[in-house]
Image (spheres, grey):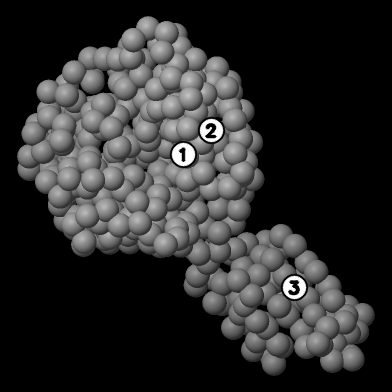
Amino acid sequence: MIRLADVVAARERVAAIVRPTPVRVSDSISRVAGRAVLFKPEHQQRTGSYKVRGAYNRISRLPEGVAVVAASAGNHAQGVAFAAGASGRQATIFMPVGASLPKIDATRGYGAEVRLIGGLVDDTLLAARDYAAESGAEFVPPFDDPHIIAGQGTVGLELADEAPDAEVVVVPIGGGGLLAGVATALAHVRPGTRIVGVEAEGAAAMQAALSARRPVVLERVATMADGIAVRCVSELTLAHALAYVDEVVTVTEEEISGALLLLLERAKAVVEPSGAVGLAAVLAGKVPGRGQACCILSGGNVDPLLLMKLIHHGLSVAGRYLVLRVVVADRPGQLARLTARLADLRLNVLDVEHHRVGSTVAFDQVEVLLTVETRGPAHASEIVTDLAADGTRVEVVS
């Protein structure tokens, strides 16, 4: 396990390349949460995530001229690429063919050679290790390395200075490197601060490992938070969690998208799903206590097309994005009357589909599929009740 001295040394080493990300409080989100909520905005870090800290702490120690290789679908890839460039060495990054184009382009933009591999992230890891064995390049793991963990732990040292009154620090968990580093640092310099780790419900590898007291390989992972979609933590990260972490909780997909939407609207922060899980846990009441809760916004590398989908999902979860199926008589003026009623209910119609033929539509009827924007769950319920009051067939699709 790493020591506080390792994290302190890492802070000195990475100081030349990290960008300051001072903690800030969000008054509006604090009101929603019912407690003071602080953010450590690592989504504004170089490369868009905290990953550059551990990558540079690991890579900058290597002898001059030694190339590096890594495997990742996103943030680790960019962190390694940047760190390699900053220390004057070549990086080769293996990424799955399904990785988002912006992440591939960003990794190349930092100077790395990107090799796309079919299959899953596990396949890219195997390819990267094989390449390291053949070429002599140094393999840089995403979390299972003491220097990586110590580098991520520099976030914890900064939190100790910037949020000394935080009752709890809430940390996203993928493989557990960030959790291990932050927990180690705070356990030594702010021992009264509680550490709560957060996983996606569909990728709860650390929770499974803590229960079994050994790493457990999940049969499958399923979450929109691809940055923390890890099937198995390591013995090293688990050991730190067992020693220093107070609790690990999980959040649902709905809770993640709701938190992401709130960050966009209230904090003006574009954060990827994995970076929003800490706030999701606080909003869901899964983080004990009433004092200051400091959430690490761990990354902001989100594909624009995925962001659009996430926003729609978040609006739907919040009851502000409603899809209705309404059946009306097939007579002139019926669609106009329907939309006039919707206008009276003070909502915005985003899309209309008009179907005359279907298994659920009678000969003299038409089916109208409406996508509308509402002001919230109460307004959505009012819309459905009003439309159904005169016997109109109305069904909530989503």
Q: At which x and y percent is residue 156?
A: 21, 32
Quadrant the N terminus occupies: top left
Task: Establish if 392 lies above or below 319.
Answer: below
Q: Secondary structure at mark 2?
A: strand
Q: Along the horizontal axis of the image, is 97 left or right of 364?
A: left
Q: What number is the disc on residue 125? A: 1
Cα–Cα span, label 3 and label 1: 45 Å
Q: At which x and y percent is residue 96?
A: 57, 41
Q: Along the horizontal axis of the image, is 121 left or right of 63?
A: right
Comparing 330 with 17, the one in front is 17
Mark 2 belongs to which amino acid?
Answer: Phe
Q: What number is the disc on residue 94? A: 2
Which badge, 3 or 2, is on the more N-terminal residue?
Answer: 2
Q: Secondary structure at mark 3?
A: strand
Give yes or no for contact between labels 2 and 1 (Cβ–Cβ under 8 Å): yes
Comparing 20 with 145, the one in front is 145
